[in-house]
């Protein structure tokens, strides 16, 4: 596709369950980011992938959160043992030049933890 | 204290008004400044990009950066109802890969 694709667009889960969120970046973009957007809180950086370099995981809020990027393309964000405070929109973005250039965002995965 | 501060609003103005949106920041290493626009239930999209200090104009939009005051602004002239969205400032330092966002200001232009 032409843009960043995320799935699922909406996910409702019960507290304690694990969830996986998928991001398919724009072809050829080496940089991939995950951000979390809570109501009234702006975009919170979670993790950054750049090519074959080790990811910058400095924004992951706890060890329940993990992410991987396979083959330099598709990325999966996994949240284990979900909590109600994990409810948010999870946004994926990709870019050609990392943080100093334009990022292209997907429409996000809206997670609701009951 | 957050690295980037932005008034979340909401801000409501009549059509045709000039809108001023602002952010302050604390990290003097920031050199790349951006404004993203986010429509409801969509991802943010880049609106304006400025390197270091100065002004940049694109149609009805003008971005200003004052590094001495650690203050950036976005002006919208002749505002239209289609400009109704959340506007997020974002910035990064040279060599850094992490883009730091403000909280976003929710703007409504009333016809």
Image (tube, coloured by chain):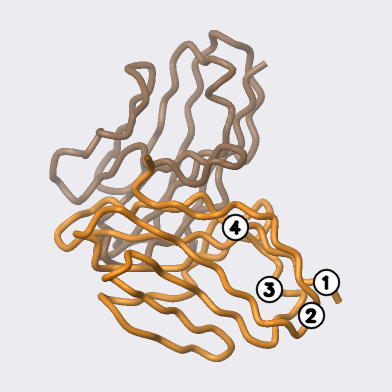
Chain colours: A brown, B orange
| Chain at tag 4 | B
| Chain at tag 3 | B
Q: What element carries label 1?
A: strand
User: Quadrant location of residue A61?
Assistant: top left
Q: Do labels 2 and 1 share a chain?
A: yes
Residue contact between numbered discs 2 and 4, judged by CB atoms under 8 Å = no
Residue tagged 2: B15
Residue tagged 1: B110
The picture places residue B69, in percent across and down from the top left corner, at: 32, 67
Residue tagged 3: B83
Q: Which mark's residue is nearer the viewer, 1 or 3?
A: 1
How far apart in space, not on screen, are marks 1 and 3 (Cα)? 10 Å
Image height of B5 relative to B62, above or below: above
| Outermost residue toward the top in this view | A16
Residue depicted at x 41% and y 79% = B64
How far apart in space, not on screen, are marks 2 and 1 (Cα)? 5 Å
Residue contact between numbered discs 2 and 1, judged by CB atoms under 8 Å = yes
Query: Foreground residue, B11 or A33?
Result: B11
Q: Which mark's residue is nearer the viewer, 2 or 3?
A: 2
The picture places residue B58, in percent across and down from the top left corner, at: 49, 88
Give whichever of discs 2 and 3 has the lower sequence position. 2
Quadrant housing the C terminus of chain A: top right
Residue contact between numbered discs 4 and 3, judged by CB atoms under 8 Å = no
The picture places residue B47, in percent across and down from the top left corner, at: 49, 73
Q: Do labels 1 and 3 share a chain?
A: yes
How far apart in space, not on screen, are marks 2 and 3 (Cα)? 10 Å
Give whichever of discs 2 and 4 has the lower sequence position. 2
Label 2: how many residues lie within 10 Å, few (<14), some (14-19) or many (20+)?
some
Residue tagged 4: B105
Query: Foreground residue, B23 or A10?
Result: B23
């Amino acid at each position: 596709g032409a843009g960043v694709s995320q799935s699922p667009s909406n996910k409702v889960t019960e507290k304690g369950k694990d969830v996986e969120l998928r991001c398919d970046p724009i072809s050829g973009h080496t940089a991939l980011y995950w951000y979390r957007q809570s109501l009234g809180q702006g975009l919170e950086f979670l993790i950054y992938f750049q090519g074959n370099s080790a990811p910058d995981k400095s924004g992951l809020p706890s060890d329940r959160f993990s992410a991987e990027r396979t083959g330099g393309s598709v990325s999966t964000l996994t949240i284990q043992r979900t909590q109600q405070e994990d409810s948010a929109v999870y946004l994926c973005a990709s870019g050609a030049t990392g943080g100093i250039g334009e990022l292209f965002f997907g429409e996000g995965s809206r997670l609701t933890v009951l | 204290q957050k690295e980037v501060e932005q008034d979340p609003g909401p801000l409501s103005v009549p059509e045709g008004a000039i809108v001023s949106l602002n952010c302050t920041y604390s990290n003097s290493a920031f050199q790349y400044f951006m404004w993203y626009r986010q429509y409801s239930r969509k991802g943010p999209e880049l609106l304006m990009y400025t390197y270091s200090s100065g002004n940049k104009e694109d149609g009805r939009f003008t971005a200003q950066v004052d590094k001495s005051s650690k203050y950036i602004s976005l002006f919208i002239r002749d505002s239209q109802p289609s400009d109704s969205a959340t506007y997020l400032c974002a910035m990064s330092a040279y060599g850094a890969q992490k883009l730091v966002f403000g909280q976003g200001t929710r703007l409504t232009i009333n016809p």
